[in-house]
Image: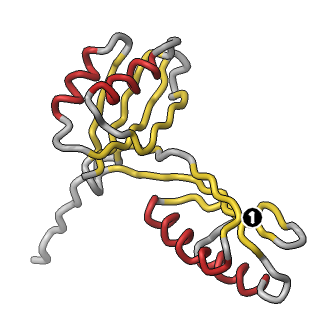
Amino acid sequence: MSHVISVTVENKPGVLARVASMFARRDFNIHSLTVGPTEDPSRSRMTVVVDGPMMEQVVKQLYKLVHTLKVTEHKPGEAIEREIMLLRVNADPKRRSEILESANMFEARTVDVGPSTVTFEVVGEPGHLADFHEMMKTYGIVSLVKSGRIAMAKDAKTATKKHKQPA
């Protein structure tokens, strides 16, 4: 089962290496790891996607690492998850309008056009990118690059107000 874990750390040298090696020592394969600044420049947030059994022990181990401030395992449906993908496909001039139409269905943005290829940028949930990738295979993928996944817990929703019954 795939797990998405956010780790807020102090923005210090070596922290990324310690987190990655902690997963490696426990024989976890990291599918995706992204790191970026937070609203506080002294902190960074890592998003780690791994397959494995329960993550309870991993979360405890992450807290033991120096410079770890907060660890959150995101449950399915409780986080906003995004990736970005650049994908270049063969684009014979006779099929170019068909390719552009297909890409438009996925809200893919055309970022480069060459004599025989078109490059698209797609941003969205991982499943959305996978669907776009699958569709573009029919045209012949020349090159592909994807970012790691980023995730943020969804905002807690307020309870709905009760309506008064008419008298």
Q: Residue at x 38, y 23 (%)?
A: 21
For residue 67, what is the image quadrant? top left
Tag 1 residue: 119
Q: Secondary structure at mark 1?
A: strand
97 shown above or below 6: below
**109 relative position to 96: left or right:** left
Which color scheme does this rendered protein use?
Answer: secondary structure
Report x, y in % for residue 145. 62, 53
Residue at the right extreme, as displayed: 115
Task: Please provide percent x and percent y for residue 125.
Answer: 46, 59
Residue located 41% across and 45% down the image: 31
Q: How many marks?
A: 1
**Residue nearest the viewer, comparing 142 with 104:** 142
- For the C terminus, which image quadrant? bottom left
Q: Position of residue 22 (x, y in %)?
A: 32, 23
* Amino acid type assigned to the residue bearing label 1 in the image: Thr
Name the outermost residue toward the left: 167
Is 120 drawn above or below residue 30 in the view shown? below
Callout 1 crowding tier (Cα within 10 Å): few <14, some 14–19, many ≥20: many
Q: Residue at x 67, y 74 (%)?
A: 140
x, y percentage for residue 124? 52, 59
Q: Quadrant of residue 52?
A: top left
14, 82: nearer the viewer? 14
Residue drawn at x 56%, y 77% as measured from the top left: 135
